[in-house]
Amino acid sequence: MAFIQCDFFSEVLGFSCSMNVILPQQTYKRKDIPTLYLLHGLSDDHTIWMRRTSIERYVASMGLAVVMPAVHRSFYTDMAAGYRYWTFISEELPAIARSFFPLSDKREDNFAAGLSMGGYGAFKLVLSCPDQFAAGASLSGALDVANLASIFENKEFENIFGDLSKIAGSKNDLFHLAESTAKSDGPRPKLYQCVGTEDFLYEDNIRFRDYIQKLGYDYTYEEGPGNHSWDYWDKMIQRVLEWLH
């Protein structure tokens, strides 16, 4: 495996960005490497998965590239008062990554996963772009952002989402996206969701589980002892990789 620390300029954001990439070696003749976009949480960055887990070792036998971008505290959203991180993560980043590395652009070879805010981002990505991503996984995801926004009601959420009363039913609402994709004639991504029973986001995850189970997705749910911590996520990212494999 190769580990690449990549700095590049984003036309969408208008400034220099970073991503870390794990890449299988012996790829000089390949243009079709399956890719996992692995997303960070609210207080983290593109380095966190490498620092807190053994993700490089976990994917070593899978022939899988892992792209880990930085999006700061954006909730993977085109912010009401900020930058266009949704456009960046859903359009520009995959194109840039494929221009640098021999990554597949086939739907069946592209996946997303993330923790907390990144779990929200991963589900948002695969539910909004089901023609581009075959599967998505959420670990302790912040899956009910309308509920979170109503609890916190702070300026940061307003800067991200704008009018907080309008999140429900919008393109930033996973419940709405899941239903819209289920009703469409296009493909549906496979979904994996896990959460620790001691996690402060447990009830939000239960609401999403109960909702999506009615929509007919190929859907896997797991829960067990654990809180919002890297002990839990290091264990469960291995479960995600088994599920993908």
Image: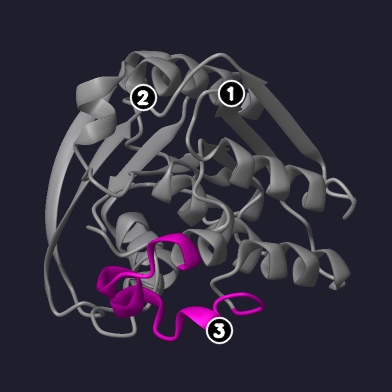
In the rendered view, tell whether residue 160 sits above or below residue 174: below
Image quadrant of residue 94?
A: bottom left
Inspect this view and state whether residue 129 appears. no
Which amino acid lies under the numbered mark 2 shown in the image of this protein?
Answer: Ser
- Could you tell me which residue is drawn at 41 percent across and 77 percent down? 161
Which amino acid lies under the numbered mark 3 shown in the image of this protein?
Answer: Lys
**Disc 1 target residue:** 197
Q: Where is residue 114 drawn, in percent x and y?
A: 45, 41
Whichever of labels 3 and 2 marks the residue nearer the N terminus, that label is: 3
Horizontally, residue 100 falls left or right of residue 243, namely left
As helix, strand or loop, the secondary structure at mark 2 comes to loop
Horizontally, residue 189 falls left or right of residue 151, namely right
Say which of 102 and 109 sits in front.
Answer: 109
**Disc 2 target residue:** 229
- Could you tell me which residue is drawn at 31 percent across and 44 percent down? 68
Dominant secondary structure, magenta = helix
Disc sitting over residue 127 in the figure: none
